[in-house]
Image (tube, rainbow, N blue to C red):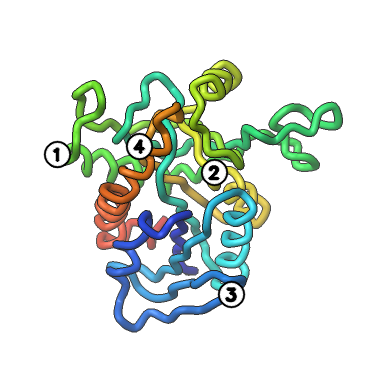
Amino acid sequence: MGRLAILGALHEEIADLLAAMDPGAAIHRIAMRDFHVGTLWGTPCVIALSRIGKVAAAATASIVIQEFKASRVVFTGLAGGLHEDVEVGDVVVASALMQHDMDARPLFGQYEIPLLGRERFDADPVLSERLLESAGQFVRQGGLPAGPGGQPPRVHHGLIATGDVFVNSNDYAHQLRQRLPDALCLEMEGGAMAQVCYEFGVPFAVLRVISDQADHAAKADFTDFLVNLARVYTAGILAPLLKSGALREA
């Protein structure tokens, strides 16, 4: 069985995973990226920092699949909340991903990926279910900050929208809510990674933690969450799955 690939766009999102890899992990430098290959809590893994944006994510996903024979890919990190039911501190596991800035009309339909004939890419149900279960257990343990409304963090399963834009505008976020009423959150990598995995026939899943509400305060909220909490969620959710071998079997 091939390796599990774990990707993140920013160092803080994967820092604790890198620190927990076995000491014998090797680092391979390809295309200005470091790929850490070894064992993480008993699971053979390749972990990489993709950097931000769709092109960066697509390039990194292609490399882990072709060069390191990754048989499953998990993208983890932060996202801006879009749906009214999603609050800062909540966890979102993707059921599917789409690119909200793809628009090749009139040649193709809005959001349709040209020549693939589809707008959305479905996440692997087995990987996603295991992430949902682990995320649920993690938030039920307590100890995490309450959301803006005072409620404990919740776990959601649904559509994630990807685009090459950091949304920090109330007006633009409102427009996206109108256009994509079922989208739970916004990020900048998952939809591109999903397209690459789809084309290679590799199962994938996306785990996102809501750091902001994609509004005028998004920059400050995102930065604070990234520095103080991002790594806590990532390691807290993934560690039990890797230690149990659940992702080796998926």
Q: Nearer the viewer, mark 2 or mark 1?
A: 2
The answer to whether residue 181 of the structure is visible from this angle is no
Relative to 141, 114 lies left or right: right
Residue 54 locus on image (x, y percent): 61, 49
Closer to the chain start, of discs 2 and 1, is: 1
In front: 204, or 222? 222
User: Which residue type does callout 4 highlight?
Assistant: Asp
| N-term-proximal mark, 4 vs 3 | 3
Q: Which residue is mark 4?
A: 221
Residue 218 x/y as whole percent: 42, 34
Q: Nearer the viewer, mark 4 or mark 2?
A: 4
Q: CA distance from mark 4 to mark 3?
A: 33 Å
Q: Residues within 10 Å of mark 4 (few under 14, many from 20)?
A: some
Q: Are marks 2 and 1 in contact (CB under 8 Å)?
A: no
Q: Which residue, given by chain and number where applicable, does mark 2 sit on?
A: 188
Give the residue displayed 49% in from the left and 56% down from the top: 73
Relative to 9, 53 lies left or right:
right
Direction right: furthest residue: 107
Circle 3 — which element? strand
Q: Secondary structure at mark 2?
A: loop
Q: Residues within 10 Å of mark 1 (few under 14, many from 20)?
A: few
Q: Residue at coordinates 20% horizontally, 31% vertically from top-left?
A: 146
Mark 2 is surrounded, within 10 Å at the Cα level, by few (under 14), some (14 to 19) or many (20 or more) other residues, namely many
